[in-house]
Structures are given as structure tokens and as C-alpha cells.
Image (tube, grey):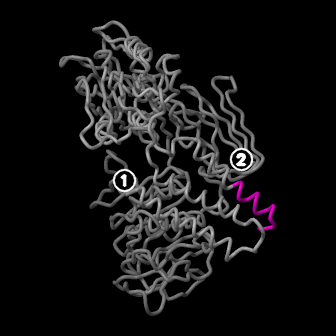
Amino acid sequence: MELLLFLILGAAGGAFAAWTYWRRELPVPGRWVPATLRAAALALALLLLLDPRLPAAQGRPERWVLIDGSTSMAVPSEAAGTAAWDSARGAAERLRAEGARVLRFGGTAAAEDSALASPPTDPRSQLVPALERAAESGAREIVVVSDFRLEDPVAARAVFQRLGVDARFIAVGGEIRNAGLAEFTVPGDVEAGAPIRGEVVVFASGGVASDTVIVEVREEDRLVWSGRAAAPAPGRTARIPVLLPAPQPRPLGGEIRYEAAVRLDGDAYGADDSRVAYAVVDEREGALVAVSFAPDWELRHLLPVLARVTGLPTRGYLRAGDRFLPTGPGAPPVSAEEVAGRVRDARLVVVHGLGAGAPGWARDAAAGAPRALVFARDPAGALAAGLFVDTPRAGEWYLDAEPPASPLAAALIGLPYPALPPLGELLPWSGAGAASAPLEARLRGAGPTQAALVLRERSEGRVAVALASGWWRWALRPGAAEEAYSRVWSAVAGWLLAGEVTPSGRIRPTERVAEGGAPIAWTGGSVAPIRVTVLQGEHVVTDTSLARPVAALRTPPLPPGSYRYLTRAGADSTSGRFDVQPSTDELRHPRMALPDSIVSPPGTRADPVGRPLRVHPVPWLILIGLLCGEWVTRRRKGLR
């Protein structure tokens, strides 16, 4: 069937090339030469798309050995007393002496015949990429030598069934007595003088039912929490909540480094025993505070957008009776007085569901905060922000396809306004006062337009008022609607904070705890000149200078450890700390249970077995030669 399809399409391609040169090009002598080259290039490109499998070359080894090069292979087991790598290397060398090809796997497939040269150091153990590479290279039999603590056991089983090759498994090593930390989390922003709620996730292997682990948490170098817990069964985790005391005051800033550690008697692998997390003490002033008096889905989607754009410490509260529930996980309810104090000290205030029933301090914030975003619920809420509106009109309000000129127009160009989900209830604005409406909507997509969002400058500062409800529906739809939600509220935040230097504009690591082996990503970089200096102790590790702004700033990977940084962007500078932490939770995965061998199911083996055409370099070189030959020939004959 594929041969017939190739012949038909190849003939059509040749006819198209001939028609082009005889009907569309100048009648130059010898035009059959470039026409032939084009027809041959089209036929070869079609053959590469069909991708037939070619028989393996004469003498090419049909048996492939995949040897696990992950770090767990270097850990001695309690029963054997030796590392699994020693046994695996011996088995692989014997098979290679018999003519097999050796490929090392871990996070990625490594070099083939140098697979046994260095000890195992890869922090991951993924088998599927190596399986696919060996099968595409013409393997008829695959031998896997591993301790089978794999990240992708389910995908590996499926690939064995799909590839149509025989497989044999050599399990090496034994159970390793170990306990480690899979996660350690604390809130990114914490209140001064308040206790901190965190969580430690522990895993274990090679133990007995009576084993217990000791977990300790240190604030800088001070032990602040210690506890015991039963060791979880292999392949499972235990979540341990930790309540840490209020952090000690620090004169050089509010950044605090916490380190959690787990201890188990007889632990054979210490690289996964600790995890690091950072918290920043929030002194209340200069934060972004959001309060909802009519809780729905809005703050859940809005706060991450505003936090990312502004870089400000973010607090969200939902009214529940006479108390307010913080939006963060596990935080206890707070009183109205506490929320009112935070609103008064905030740098940017978001008041959601503001209406006649809101307390006086919320209306005062909408009326007098230097930077405020208000979602009005009724005319009283809009009046607090300085707008005169009529009674709300229910229905489906679709944004107008041609928004008027406004300070946000440049940031909102290209949004698919008519395709966005409709907004809900809308408060018709009279248009009185010095204000602009960057977004307008029509009821059921027809009739006169009404302002859905209003921007107003006043003597106290700036306020943005959302007169429609249901913006969160955009965020629930991945794709264009979700992007529109992010762009609209990012633009509003940018307008509210225009002219101010926010933390998001400063250069700092995107993650205070980065993964080892990956480049260090930094926020900012839109202002030049840029300089990023990373130090370990007093020693300069990297020093990067750029004369022009960049869209994405990255510096080279760093070995695991604690670092300080000094950054400058234009006239603004900042400093801080971050850690690089290796991915050392490989022993978290239990050993995969496999039979001694797997025979390929009937009908799955290709005949003949060989490498797909696309993995051979020769067809690609021929295709490039044909295309270049046609181009040179055309130029020599005077054709463009």
C-alpha cells in the first residue's frame, strides 16, 4: 500500500516539476536539468515522510544493552555489600564482547560505546528514551541492566509492547536502606512575629515496619523544629506538617533560609536527606492585599497574575461571616481589624465584590488608596470609587471588537474580543467625570456599548474599576481566553503602578531554590546595562554583564550549594541569596517488577527489522545536494 502511494504521489510530484519549468519558467535551454533535480528532491522528501524501515547493515549488532547510569546504581545495598554498578558493568562488558552494542541511560540516552567509562552520576532514571533510540537503530533484542528504580515504569511497559522487539532484563543490586525528603515547603511570604506553617514529605526504602525517622528543621543555623514519624512503605510518602516559631528579626532584610533534614539509622545514601526553602518576612507595608466580599473564582485566578507582574508580596482574604479566610493553604482565619490594617498599609489594594454591605474601611480604601483595583457589586460600590452608575443589568455582555483609545490600548492589541466568554452582570456607567474606558461590552453582542472597565486618575492616585462580573470565566479556558485574562489584568497592574520600581522589575532568581544541572533563570532584564554577579562565600563564581536588554536572562548552571547574588539593571540594584539543589529523589521510586524476558507480540515485528529511513544521514545529505544543485543550475541558466 505504501509503495503504491509513493508511486502515485511521486509521479504527481514529477509532473508538477515538469509543468512548472515548461509552463511557468522562461524557455531556457537545458531546463530539463533543474526540473529533474526538483522532481528527485520531491520524491526523496516524500520517501522520508513515509519513513520505511531499511534492513540492518551487514554485520551490524542486532542486540542492544541498555545500562542504567543513575546515581542509585552507585549505592551499595545492605545485602550484597557492593554497588549495583559493579555487577551491571560486568554483565554489560560480557555482552559487548559477544557483539552487543551498549547504550547508557538516565535522564537522557548517553554515548553508546563509552557507556561504561565513568561511574553513574545521572540524577534521573528514564528508560523510554533509550528504548526508542535502540529500536529505531535496528535492535532486534534489547537487554536492560538496571536496578529498575525507574521514573517511567508504566510508559516503559507500554513501549515494550509497541516497539515489537524482544527484551531481556538483568536486575542488579538489592534493597537500599534509605530515607529522604521529596518536598519541603514553607510560605514564600510570612508575617513578622507570626508562626509559620510548613510541610515535609518523607520517603523511605529498604526498611522494616518498625522504622522511625527523625525530621529536623533549621532557621538559618538555629534548630526550630524536631519530630519523629513512622517511615513510609517503599513507593509511598508521608506528609508531616511542621509549625515553626516566628522568625527572628534580621537587620539586613527579611529573607530567611530554612533547611529540613531527615535521619534514619543505617541510611546508605545521604544526598537526598535535606531540602532547602526560603521565606521572606512581610513587614505589612508595600504588599499587594486583596479582599473579597462576594467570594467566587476571581481572586483564585487574579492573584497569581498580579503577583507575577508586580513581584509584590501578595495576601488574599475572603469574607466568611465576621472573619476573613486567607487564600493561602492552611492559614488560620483573621479578624476584620487585621485585614483593615493590612489594607491601609498596602501598596496596591484589590477590593472585590464592593457594595453597600461592605465595611467602611473597604469603601475608604476604594476612595482613597493610592493604587486600587475595585470590582464593584452595586452602585454604592462604584460610587465609593468615584463613579456614578445605574442599577446592574444582567445578561451576557460580549466585549466590543473595537475598544476605544485608552492608556491600555497598546498592551491589549490583538486580543480576540468577540471570541472571549461573555461577562456577567454589568453596571451601566454614566460617563461623567475624567475617566477612560479601555474595554466596552454589548448586551448579547448587539446594541449600544457600555464600559466594562474604567480607569480613573484622582488626587490620591489611580483607581481601576471593573463594572462587570465573571472575568474569571476567561481564565478557565486554556488558550486565547486565558492569555487575554492575563494580558488585561497585567496591563491594569502596570497602569496602576506606572512610574514606580516594583520587585518584578529587578533582576533576581526566578526560583530561590534552583535545580542542579540547569541554567539559572532570572527575572527582569528589560533595562540596560545589566550585571549579575554570583558569589559563594567571598569567591566570585560567575560575573555576567550585558549592554542591551534581554527577553530571558539565564546564567550557566552551578553545582549544588548556597550562593549570594548582586545584580544591577540600569540605576537599580538588589542583592539576595539562593540555593542550587540536586535532583536526588531517585530512591523514592520502588523497584519495577518485571519478568526475566518479554517476547514481542505476534504481528508487531517489522519485516525486515531495521532502522527507519529518517535516522540515516545519507538521504538528508542527498536531499540537501539536490536542492542546492537545482538552485545553482537555475542561477547559471539565468532563472531566479
Residues packed near mark 2 inside 10 Å, few (<14), some (14 to 19) or many (20 plus): many
Magenta extent: 628-640
- Most extreme residue toward the top is 81
**Residue hosting label 1:** 327
Residue type, mark 1 in image: Thr
Q: Is residue 37 left or right of residue 148?
A: right
Mark nearer the viewer, 1 or 2: 2
Instruction: Classify residue 616 by image quadrant.
Output: top right
The residue located at (41%, 62%) in the rendering is 478
* Spot occupied by residue 526 in the image (x, y as percentages of width and height): 68, 53
Is 637 inside the magenta-drawn segment?
A: yes
The residue located at (50%, 34%) in the rendering is 515
Q: Is residue 420 above or below residue 614?
A: below
Instruction: Classify residue 302 by image quadrant.
Output: bottom left
Q: Look at the numbered discs 1 and 2 and tell me whether their residues touch, using CB distance below 8 Å.
A: no
Nearer the observer, 1 or 481: 1
Q: Main secondary structure of the magenta part?
A: helix
* Spot occupied by residue 540 in the image (x, y as percentages of width and height): 70, 26
Query: How far is the residue under mark 1 from the one under mark 2?
Result: 33 Å
Label 2 sits on a secondary structure element that is: strand
The residue located at (67%, 61%) in the rendering is 499
Q: Is residue 551 left or right of residue 130?
A: right
**Mark linked to residue 569:** 2
Q: Could you tell me if residue 178 is visible in this image?
A: yes
* Spot occupied by residue 352 in the image (x, y as percentages of width and height): 41, 67
Quarter containing the C terminus: bottom right
Q: Is residue 608 above or below residue 558?
A: below
Quarter containing the N terminus: bottom left
Q: Is residue 395 above or below residue 7?
A: below
